[in-house]
Amino acid sequence: MANESVSVKMDGPKAEYKGRKLRVAIVGCGGIAQTHLKAHKENPAVEVVAGVDVRADRLAVMRDKWGVPESALFGADLASGKTLSETAWRDMLRKMGDKIDAVDVCTPNGWHCQPVVDCCRAGKHAFVEKPMAMAVAEGRRMVAAAKAGGVKLSVGFQQRYRPAFESLVEARDAGVFGDILFVKVRRLRRRGIPNWGVFGRKELQGGGPVIDVGVHYIECAYEFMGCPKPVAASAMTWRYLGNREEATHVRCPWPGWDWKTYTVEDLAVGQVRFDNGAIMQIETSFAAHVKENDVAEFSAMGTKGGCQFPTGEIFTDQNGTMVNVAPAYLDPAGDGWDALFARKLGNWVDGCLKGTELGASGEDGLNVQRILNGLYDSAALGGREVAIR
Ligand SMILES: NC(=O)c1ccc[n+]([C@@H]2O[C@H](COP(=O)([O-])OP(=O)(O)OC[C@H]3O[C@@H](n4cnc5c(N)ncnc54)[C@H](O)[C@@H]3O)[C@@H](O)[C@H]2O)c1
């Protein structure tokens, strides 16, 4: 019998949460932090108690929308609007001390490593948005700091929480695909160069579409493959639109990006080899002359079957016939943007409070970082294959 009528929703009082709360400070209170704040607000086990940003207007939103007292806001002066410090999480650690348990880092990529290292060393759990960092050495420092501080470190990958991904992983574990031989990742935007933040600046982001959008599908494809050891990468990257003013005159969803400071790639094509002989191919762009405006997918071929994500389709043989199997039902609510963030952040909160296993740990983030930087290292050598260490 169903627990609850499906035709009439009965809204009763929710049971009051009586457990321990995770007291979180947000470092970098910009665009994506707003989605994090929403997820935290809806999680009764979280209390956002502090905010750090170099911009006073961002701190004002923390105070006015999210109710964080001015005394717990760091990095800029709300009255004058001036930036006070670019490393204000250190002031926050000094002044808040035992009043915070964890930090949620949503700064641009170039500012991921140091706040995580300082906060983990101070015994605070850390969540860091994707990509983990700009370089493998930074990722290693972050993982080491979390270990030294005895705290949980998680990286902001949300594609793995899609219902279709979970159903494909179950099929993989049941042996439906056999050995996975080849995976192809495609994360292509026709003209989708971010016109906010610093996404076009290599020195602050570490790269363009590979590290910013490709990373999501590289990560979940890699997880789907069962995380074999990456051994070598080869890639080419090209920049031909983002740094040209005339390209900004084309109608597109995010016009007017800063073409003058654009130093990252528009398009990258690469390949990663793994120690089990499997191969991952990657195509990713902010700006490429393709038919579709936005492609976000991976496909896989195994010895017994293949699949496609995010459709969740499986291609195999059954009773002497080649069949294409599509899921008849996957929870559509589970694919929503807010739902994915609620799950990825909730996973970290549970890990911090209850010691449960993290979805994407610091070590997982570091493996992905090694792949990203392998691709960039090869591109810097004109596409020659490089060893991934
Ligand atoms: N998981 C996802 O799907 C997803 C989506 C968007 C962005 N992101 C990631 O989130 C991060 C931030 O992206 P965004 O779109 O929110 O950018 P954003 O520019 O909107 O926000 C970044 C914020 O960090 C602040 N900041 C910069 N330097 C700082 C410093 N030294 N100390 C404190 N604050 C500082 C900026 O003032 C800004 O408010 C990036 O790493 C990006 O890759 C992830």
Image: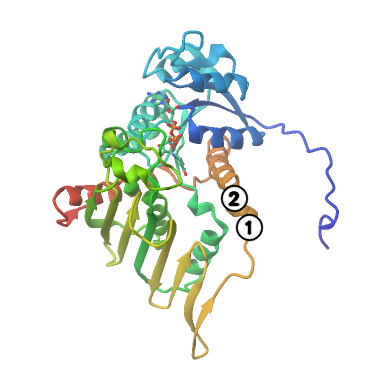
Residue 17 image-quadrant placement: top right
Give me the residue at 51% from left, 65% from top: 168
Q: Report the side of 15 relative to 57 (left or right).
A: right
Q: Residue 171 carries which label?
A: none
User: Is 89 located above or below residue 229 in the figure?
Assistant: above
Colour scheme of the picture? rainbow
Q: Residue 336 carries which label?
A: 2
Q: Report the side of 357 relative to 119 (left or right).
A: right
Give me the residue at 30% from left, 35% from top: 201
Dot 2: element: loop
Asked if one can make out residue 207 in the rendered structure from this viewpoint, the answer is: no
Instruction: Answer few, some or many: residues within 10 Å of disc 1's Cα (few below 14, many 20 plus, some between 14 and 19).
Output: few
Residue 132, how many percent across, how many down?
37, 40
Dot 1: element: helix
Please state the quadrant of the image where ligand 1 appears. Answer: top left
Residue kind at label 1, given as amino acid type: Pro
Asked if one can make out residue 88 in the rendered structure from this viewpoint, the answer is: yes
Give me the residue at 52% from left, 66% from top: 312
Residue corresponding to mark 1: 332
For the N terminus, the image quarter is bottom right
